[in-house]
Image (cartoon, helix red, strand yellow):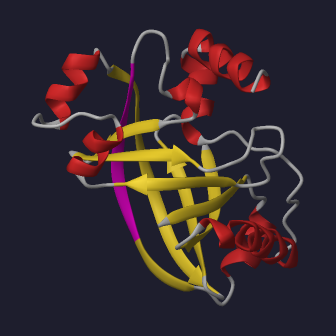
Amino acid sequence: MIEIEKKFILTPEQEKSLIEGAEFLGEKQFTDIYYDDNNFSLTKKDIWLRERDSKFELKLPMNESFEKRVADQYRELDVEDDILAHFGSRGVSVKEFLIEKNYKPFCKITTTRKKYKKDGFGIDLDIMDFGYTLAEIELMVDNELNMKEATNSIINFASKCGIDTTVSILGKVMKYLQLNNPTHFQALIDEWKNN
């Protein structure tokens, strides 16, 4: 599956409009640990390898480029064998693979998430342990042909809720890096500007 999502920072009025009439699916808390090497070889490619509550996940970019990005588009792998196969590694665990590649934790974030469903869209309202708050509107699609249509649907849905869709918002990891590791943050900004 391919996840299409757009991030927003909402005013209280926008949040109220967004979740009005939505089905509340629950609240949960989880901790993400993100991994990369000292050269930022994964994150420079917009590849996010994380461990969420002891389960590994890999997010692979599907966007054409950063300049044309309207929403985030990622293919998600959450089976260890699939993650290892992506890197061409077999016969080891992900933990062993991390040691082998010298991938170390660079970011640990605990998130409290409220999940909603409205008009077929997933809505996540996140509060991070370092004081950052985000909303995400997302759709899952099963093939690349539906990505543009899903992006447009998210934009239209957000606009109907009175949300400005033209503002570019930092995701939680980028905001964390901006605040806590400016060297890594700037390396990613520089890399993405050149691609």
Question: Is 30 covered by the magenta stretch?
Answer: yes
Q: Residue at x 57, y 15 (%)?
A: 184
Q: Is residue 133 above or below residue 117?
A: above
Q: Residue at x 54, y 18 (%)?
A: 180
Q: Which residue is drawn at 57% across and 73% down?
A: 141
Give the main secondary structure, helix, strand or loop, of the magenta stretch: strand
Q: Which of 141 and 118 is in front in this view?
A: 141
Q: Can residue 131 be seen in this view?
A: no
Q: In this view, does 160 lie above or below 2?
A: below
Please tell me in which quadrant of the rendered image residue 49 appears. top left
Please tell me in which quadrant of the rendered image residue 7 appears. bottom right
Question: Is 115 covered by the magenta stretch?
Answer: no
Q: Give the range drawn in magenta.
A: 27-36
Q: Which residue is drawn at 49% across and 71% down?
A: 115
Left or right: 134 in relation to 86: right
Q: Nearer the viewer, residue 118 or 67?
A: 67
Q: Where is residue 60 in the image (x, y as percent from the top left)?
A: 50, 45
Q: Where is residue 43 in the image (x, y as percent from the top left)?
A: 52, 27
Q: Nearer the viewer, residue 121 or 180?
A: 121
The residue furthest front is 88
Left or right: 193 in relation to 22: right
